[in-house]
Amino acid sequence: MEPQLPAVATAVALPFVAAALTPLLYRFVGEAVGYFGAAIAGLSFVLVVSQVGTEGTVSVQWIPSLEVAVRFHVDGLALLFGMLASGIGVLIFAYSAGYMQGKPNLARFYMTLLGFMGSILGVAFAADLVVLFLFWELTSVCSFVLIGYHTDDDESRYSARMAMLVTVGGGLCLLAGLLVLAAAAEMAGVEAFNLAAMLADSASVAAQLKEVGLFVPALVLVTIAAAAKSAQVPLYFWLPRAMVAPTPVSAFLHSATMVKVGVYALGRFRPLFHGVEWTLLVATLGLATMTVGAVLAVRARDIKELLAYSTASHLGLMVAGFGFQTHYGADAGVFHLLNHALFKAALFLVAGIVTHQVGTRNVEELGGLARDLPVTAAITGVAALSMAGIPPFNGFYSKELLFEAAWETAVANGDLAWLYPATAALASVFTVLYSLRFLWLFLGDRPDSVGSVSRPSLALLAPPAVLAALVAVLSVAPHLGIEFVVQDAASATAVEPVEVHAALPLSVSGPALMSLGAIAVGVAIFPAYGRLQGRLDAAHGATTRLHPTVLYGRVLTATDEASVRLSGFVHNGLIRTYAWWTLLAACGLVLAGYVTAAVGLPTPLAVETSVAMVLVLAVSVLSAVAVAATDTHVTGVLTLGILGFMVAIFYILASGPDLALTQLVVETLLLLIFLLALEEMPAFYGELEWDVAAKDAALSIAVGVTAFVSVLLTAPSGDGGLTETAGEYVERAVPDGGGTNVVNVILTDFRAFDTLGESIVIVLAALSVLVLLAMRTRGETQ
Amino acid sequence: MRLSESHTDEPNHEAAVRRWATVTTTIMRTTARVVVPIILVVSISLFLQGHNYPGGGFIGGVLTVAAFTLVYVAYGLDYLEVGVLNRDVDYSAGIYEHRTVSAYRRLFIFGLAVTVGSGLGALLFGEQFLSQDYTYVHLPLFGEVELASALVFDLGIFCVVVGGLLLIFSVVGAE
């Protein structure tokens, strides 16, 4: 069945429209605007669910000349991701309404959250590379704003900037990768930016990529982008930092949806890049992250930090799943996408409740909360056991699928490939450990430092309860989820037909033994958790130099220092320096453009030049020399004026009345402005300094050469008649534009967009003057 | 800023105008008096005839700016308020709150709105953004007159140029 464009487009656009209305609505209803967000998310959710079972691409033209369109592709994977974003969105908005009570800047908070949800839905359904990239970057921007929610907190700002640099840096890699893909697609005869068509014809696009030798670069670029977004080794370090955001944000962005965008992209591109290189890169990356994340989660002392590292670890699991070539891999990736979103969002919301009710996030100060928070404890029980991968919870099924994929790959390839299942099993041991530790917040001994704990309100309790209920349903009857959407979603990421199955293993097999072993070892080590943490701390301390955070800090400091040094040259507060560098850079860029385009210099057309014109040009050359030679401002201004008016006369002689008029008017205005400023300037120029003069002479020559070459290149060549473009403008001016002044018709009609841009430049200049001067007098200097 | 500060102790604005008069010469002021109306008329005619003869929004705008700058140089910023509109000027407020300056600011915002609006207007008729159209109407006395939607667009450009440049001159000039 074909999907309906209005439904999909509305689901994506609705949150953006709502985001625009939020500040206005906030004035009237105040904090209840959270429920408005929940309603919008609900609407989007219903619209997405209404498309379940459909598959196909719908599009509206956007930039037809570049084959860019607002194109949405609906299939199982997109629907699964869309449902997660909007469905969990409903719960998050409802939870925020309770959790964020009395907090500042709520209008901005909800606005960004809504905008984020729209962007995520956009990523889910986008089937055009340009649109995909736009939505992808929008999620990073929203995440930046939300992490920096506490704008006056240094750590908050630092973390927001770190997340922005890493994810947007990854986004640049994505842009490069997508451009490579678009070029290859065009060569393969597929519409350049049409992702859906590209995937439908993935074999020929991949073949084309290999032919031009860009297969591996494109693969690496897309993987780096996904790794930055989905917190893979070694770019995971921003995710725990992002936990300074309010808990609903952590639950929504940094566990359930945004960080899964990278995983989702890998799933999308999997059919295209499928191959040995893909497994080697992606599966290895995923398993490494899975292990590192799990180990760091065991070391964590803060419950949100623990959950953050655990999220990175589980994202690694999904990435590894997509990395394996067997269909089990696709099954594992997609099914875990769903399972993880459910149990991890629930756990984050639980962490929020604990923080809200107890007032601390330190693991060591928490324990035995089951008596105070029985419902929360029950929710945690379900979600944490699912996270640990204990049968018969749903987390077990998807992890078992990963084990099967790893096992099958190892059996097929032998030797070093056995490292895959071994690493997966090792990571699972640590997963069991930290899951149990989280559960022990509610069991175990209750420290005395925990005072009386009140029960959370229904608004806080209901969202995680719904999620835990869904986890329970999927645990008891996994086939419901599989039949509803997981099966279709896995097919979209796989090359061969897939049959997702989820059941308890009834016979002895390699994967089953891996699961059993991991759980047994995890439970056996758990009593020694404290000692293990000590060992890990020691190892952590010994390897400080290698930590990504340290490297990140070093890169940042080096960049800072370099820019300080550079700004001493370019940015020294003297306007002449600014002009010097700006002009030089402009000339350099223009000349470099001519050189790379390898344009030959045309021989100028010899046209008979009238005596009047020669005279005018001679006078202007003389006045130009006089400008340079004069030593007072008054003569300088006057000779400059002569030069300007000579140019205007030249325009008249060259039959360009509009240009001449403009030149005359501007020249008059300039004279007036000089009159205004003349009084404030020193009457005489200072002493001539030879080094400054030499520098300026060099610049003058550069500008002159650039202008001369440009004039030569743009001058009409050939028989001296009108060029094709000019001829068409002249022909069309009267019938299409209704005006006989071709220049003005071009300005207001044919190329009105350029004119609009120029008027915006004037507005910007005026605003900058206003802002700069106003800020200076207020003493707002940073 | 220097100018408005020097006026804070001057309650009588007639005197303020007179004080400015000592900065410029009688020749300057008399010339301005004669020339400014002519410049304004020429600039409007250049603006209106732009579609068929040399001229247009930008040229007309810059010429208008020249006229106002001439007034500014000859009589000072407050002249439009005090001398023409006969209103009081609050000297204690900074240059950014000056009524003339905020009028300039409103003018270029209005201009930008007109420009973009005329572009969006085309969308209502199912045309592409910023496409223009024209028609002929018959008016008594004038005969056949061409009405081009481009004139609306040009009006926006005119306002942006006038408002933007005058704002820059008055604010920078006050420094």
Image (tube, coloured by chain):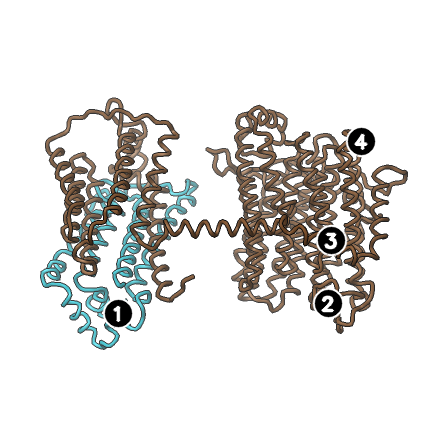
Chain colours: A brown, B cyan
Q: Is residue A128 above or below residue A548?
A: above
Secondary structure beneath dot 4 equals helix
Q: Describe the element under mark 1 as helix, strand or loop.
A: helix
Q: Which mark is residue A411?
A: 4
**Dot 3 alpha-carbon crowd within 10 angstroms: few under 14, some 14 to 19, many 20 or more:** some
Q: Position of residue A27 (x, y in %)?
A: 53, 66
Query: In the rendered structure, the residue with mark 2 lies on which chain?
Result: A
Nearer-the-camera pick, A179 or A313: A313
Which residue in the protein does label 1 denote?
B4
Residue furthest to the front: A542
Badge 2 vs badge 4, beta-carbon distance below 8 Å: no
- In depth, the one of A659 and B124 nearer the eye is A659
Q: CA distance from mark 2 to mark 4?
A: 51 Å
Q: CA distance from mark 3 to mark 2?
A: 35 Å
SS for callout 2: loop
Q: Residue at (15%, 70%) from the top-left corner?
A: B18
Q: Disc 1 residue type?
A: Ser
- Distance from disc 1 to disc 3, alpha carbons, whole Å, reads 69 Å
> Mark 4, chain letter?
A
The amino acid beneath tag 4 is: Val
**A681 lies left or right of A595:** left
Q: CA distance from mark 1 to mark 4?
A: 86 Å
**Cβ atoms under marks 1 and 2 closer than 8 Å:** no
Which quadrant of the structure image shows residue B67? bottom left
Q: Residue furthest right?
A: A507
Are labels 3 and 4 on one chain? yes
Q: For residue A536, which numbered disc appears in the image?
A: 3
